[in-house]
Image (spheres, rainbow, N blue to C red):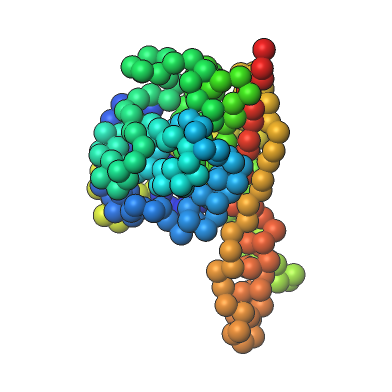
Amino acid sequence: MHNAASNGHRNARHRAGGWEPLADWYDGWMGKNGSLHHQRLAIPAVMELLSAQPGEKILDIGAGQGVLAPHVIQAGADYTGLDASPSLLRQARKHHRQGRFLLGDARNLQRLAGMQANMFDAAVFLLSIQDMDPLPAVMEAVAWVLRGGGRVVILMLHPCFRVPRQSGWGWQEERKVRFRRIDRYLTPLSVPLKEYPGQGSGVSISFHRPLQHYINTLADCGLLIEQMKEITTYKTSRENTQGLQRVQARAENLANQEIPLFLALRARKACL
């Protein structure tokens, strides 16, 4: 469910068995509650935009171990998590006794047993949309499963600033500034990401798309954006050091406050 920003890299969830080789490693890294980035940044932002109400039906697409489940259930809503990895779904059922978890392809919700048109009040992609391709097929399926006026909340790595293997941090000595370098942006990319110690076999894939691709695809599917949040990370460096180290720490914290880590969107299905 989570990718480059939180070091939780995944294969495209719709590819049969694609995530299975990494499932045990990923569950060991993520655990029941998610990473620190999930707990402090991603989940609070998603729940704010989702604004889940008692009795609503919420579909979590790319649910992984179901880290969002207890938050949705605590809000009084009905939770359904969907993922293409049987191993991660087993972990989700072990971690979370409430809610239901389904094995399925995000591009083909119409083919899942028990799935119906206009069935859900809201759908969520919590750091999962950049693991799925092609985007139009996924959004068409989401639009089908949402009722009229239903909403979709997407939280992802900010595609303008966090392009896998095509962006990074730099230090300009003359100005004492930490800057974000972007090498490529407009071209959609399928990027294999690096392996991590102990993760075993398998290489995760991240699909980079420019922001216009997301906005236009949502609109083409009758999902109209009504709110956007750009989310920065928390301070990571202590500034009570001396000399150059203190200058660099201040520059790093300023960059963290100014250059977003995540982008969150809420779109609503047009009522016809």
Q: From the viewer's perspective, is 170 left or right of 67?
A: right
Total marks placed: 0
> Where does the C terminus fall, quadrant-wise?
top right
Residue drawn at x 34%, y 34% is 100
| Residue, far bottom | 242
At 62% across and 68% down in the image, what residue appears? 252
Task: Identify whether 21 is placed above or below 151.
Answer: below
Name the foreground residue: 162 vs 82. 82
Residue 170's x, y, as percent? 62, 61
* Depth order, front residue of 72/161: 72
Indicate the position of residue 138 as horizontal and vertical percent values.
Answer: 49, 23
- 88 relative to 169 in the view: left or right: left
Residue appearing at x 68%, y 26% in the figure: 224
Dividing the picture into quadrants, the one containing residue 241 is: bottom right
Is residue 267 shown to the viewer in this render? Answer: yes
Residue 104, located in which quarter of the rendered image? top left
Judge by depth and name the residue closer to the eye, 47 or 216. 47
Q: Position of residue 271 (x, y in %)?
A: 66, 17
Considering the image in quadrants, where does the N terminus appear?
top left
Residue at the outermost right position: 175
Residue 182 visible in rendering: no
Does residue 150 sit above or below 111 in this rendering? below
Quarter assignment of residue 168? bottom right
- Residue in view at x 57 percent, y 77 percent: 238
